[in-house]
Amino acid sequence: MTVIAYIVAVLSGAIMLALVYRKAAPHEALVRTGLGGLKVTFNYMFMLPIIHRTEKISLASQNLLIKLQGRKGVTCKNTLKADIVLSVFISINRNVRDIALIAKTIGCENALSTATLNERFALQFTEVLKVVAQKYNMQEISTKNQAFKLDLIAAFNIAEHGYHLDDIVIHSVRQTALNYLDPNDICDVVAIRLITEQTAKEKISANTLHIETKEQIAQQNYRHLQKLLQIEHDTALLQQAHNKQLATIQH
C-alpha cells in the first residue's frame, strides 16, 4: 500500500467514524430515533445516516424567573403583601425513562427552553409560592429565607413531569406599595390599615428621635458653655490673685 493510499484509507475511516459515532458531553444526553426505536445514552452511541437521527438534550440547570409584584404581590401571614422576585433552577432528571418521555412529548431542543419552562411550570410555581407565603410574615420571608426556600422546594413537585428542581434563589422581598392595594378587598383593607398604622408609628418615632437629638445637642452645648464660663471665671480669679501678689511685692 502506497503512502497516499494509506492516508486515503485513514481519512476515509475517520470520516466514516465521524458519521456513525456520537459522544455525549458531561451535561447532556444523546437521543437516537429511527431503526430500533428510541434510545438514550449518557456516554456514546453509533448511528447509521438516514436510518437513524441523533439529537443532544441538555441536562444543565436552567433558570425560570418568577416576578410577583404590584397587584400580583403575594399575601403573607400578617395580611401584608410582598413583592417577590426569585429564580427557580430546573433541570431534566438524569434517567433514561424521563429523558425519553421528554424527548417524545416536547422534543430535545425545546426541553429546557424559556418558553417551555414558563408554559409548564410558571403558573404552578406561582400558586405554590402564594400558598407557602401565607405561612410567613413578610419580614420572616427575608429573615428566614432558608426555611422559606425549603418549604417551596418541598411543595413544588415536578418529578412526575421528568424534571428536577435544583435550587431557588430569592433576589428581593419588598412590601407591596400602598397604591397597589385594593380598598374593596377585605385582605387588602387590613393590609392598608396595618401599613397606615405602622407608617404613623414610624413618623412619631422619627419625630421623637429628632426632638431627643435636638435636646441632647442643646444639653451638650449648655454643658460646654458652662465649662467655658467656669474656665474664664477661674482664669480671672487667678489673674486677680497674681496682680495682688505683685502689688504686695512692690510695696
Image: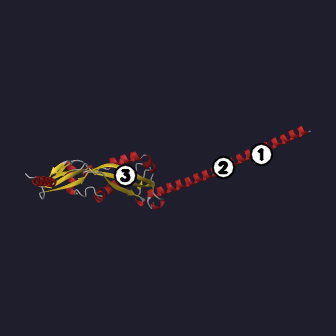
Of mark 1 and mark 2, the one earlier in the sequence is 2
Quarter in which the C terminus is drawn: top right
Q: Which circle, 1 or 2, is nearer the viewer?
A: 1
Q: Amino acid at mark 2?
A: Ile
Cβ atoms at labels 3 and 2 below 8 Å apart: no
Q: Amino acid at mark 1?
A: Glu
Is 224 left or right of 22, judged from the image as shown? right
User: Closer to the observer: label 3 or label 1?
Assistant: 1
The residue pinned by badge 1 equals 232
Residue under numbered circle 2: 217
Residue 72, picture quadrant: bottom left
Residue 180 in percent (x, y) is at 45, 61
- The residue to which callout 3 is attached is 131
Q: Position of residue 188 (x, y in %)?
A: 45, 58
Disc 1 and disc 2 in contact, CB within 8 angstroms: no
In the rendered image, residue 126, in percent from the top left (x then y), is placed at 35, 55
> Which badge, 3 or 2, comes first in the chain's sequence?
3
